Amino acid sequence: MTFCRKEGVLAFIAKLTVSLTLLGLVVSHAFAQMPPPKVEVLELMPQEMRQWDHFSGRISAVESVEIRPLVSGRIEKVLFREGQRVELGQALFVIDPRPFEAEVKRAEATLATARAKLHLSAQAFRRSSELLGDKLISQSVYDESLTDNEIAKAAVLEAESQLLNAQLDLEYAHIDAPIAGTVGRAELTAGNIVGAGAAAPVLTTIVAQERVYAEFRVDEQSYLKFIRDEARPSEMPVQLSLKNDPQMRFEGHIHAFDNHLDSTSGTIRGRAVFENSNGMLTPGMYADVHVGSVQKQAVFVLPERAIGTNQDRRFVFVVDDENVAQYREIVLGEQLRGQRIIRSGISAGDRVVVNGLSRVRAQTPVNPVAAEITQDVASREF
């Protein structure tokens, strides 16, 4: 009984083995009959691009002025609206001018008196000179007349100086914009009493916005590369992008680097200048600063979808002359709006699979067709 049961099991195993073998042959034959997968390939051509370094920065004003009173008095008028554009010399505040107008009139009267006395002393001096020549007066009388005339001249100079000061105070009572720009809010309104001097309050501020600075910090290695590769920082191309719209770029140039590194952070402060005629860049904004190399470099660029991942490695498939897919490990560079710079692993003329990557296996035939994409990155060098 046991012998018969074993014999039946062996027969079943033999039949199963034959069936699986036949099935494998059928499947292998079916795969052998499948056509190579159709894939899109891109023939690589090197592109001339700049190398960019990226830093966080903050926008600041090229010109910013705090408006303070130069004379004491009561604010009579506020002549601007908060946030409006003001031009150089435009009236902003008026401090009650009447005390200063009165002081100007008093100084004018003092000057007139001094000039009259000078005229009188000048006539007396001329007569003394004539009398001394005729030896009709003593030398001491002549000297006294000369002194009186010189004192009268000095009095005129003093009176002119007092008048000038009074006129300046009257002028300072009318506070005008020292620069063109955007004016802030009025910190003090009409009716308030203000004082002059070191403790004078800030009445408002004006910020010039035609140009702005972007201040940023550069690490030591990047700075060493800049001074090694670039003869003049002003020639280095610079772009700026805002945090809420990284695709919009503003063109500028390096204004200067600081004269020392911060020993605590190991960075050096840089400053770039950007035109801001449309007023989109506001002092205080955070931004990204992109500093480019003067010389362009030849690089390869591929779409992100052409790049595969194998654990911590990146690879592409290159189609050889026999239309067989070859596995290539690559080193990635910067991102370019859905594309990638490839630092190494591929060469000019390689046909890289850019669409249909999931259908490709290494060392298997493929049916390559030219991809309808371009490698031109001249307009997006960042």
Image: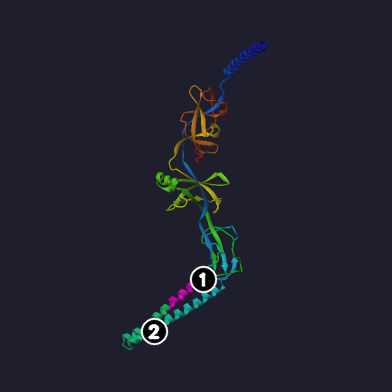
At mark 2, the secondary structure is helix
Instruction: From the image, give the main secondary structure of the stretch colored magenta.
Output: helix
* Residue behind mark 1: 169
Determine the residue located farthest toward the right in the rendered image. 1
User: Is residue 157 part of the magenta span, yes or no?
Assistant: yes
Where's residue 248, x and y in %?
55, 44
Mark 2, Cα crowd under 10 Å, few <14 / some 14-19 / many 20+, is: some
Circles 1, 2 touching at the beta carbon (< 8 Å): no
Query: Which residue is found at the position 61% from the left and 16% from the top?
Result: 20
At mark 1, the secondary structure is helix
Of badges 1 and 2, nearer the viewer stands 1
Where's residue 31, x and y in %?
58, 19
Identify the image quadrant of the N terminus: top right
* Residue behind mark 2: 124
Query: Which residue is found at the position 45% from the left and 80% from the top?
Result: 116
User: Is residue 233 part of the magenta span, yes or no?
Assistant: no
Q: Amino acid at mark 2?
A: Ala
Where's residue 77, x and y in %?
60, 66
Q: Amino acid at mark 1?
A: Asp
Q: Which residues are magenta?
A: 155-168
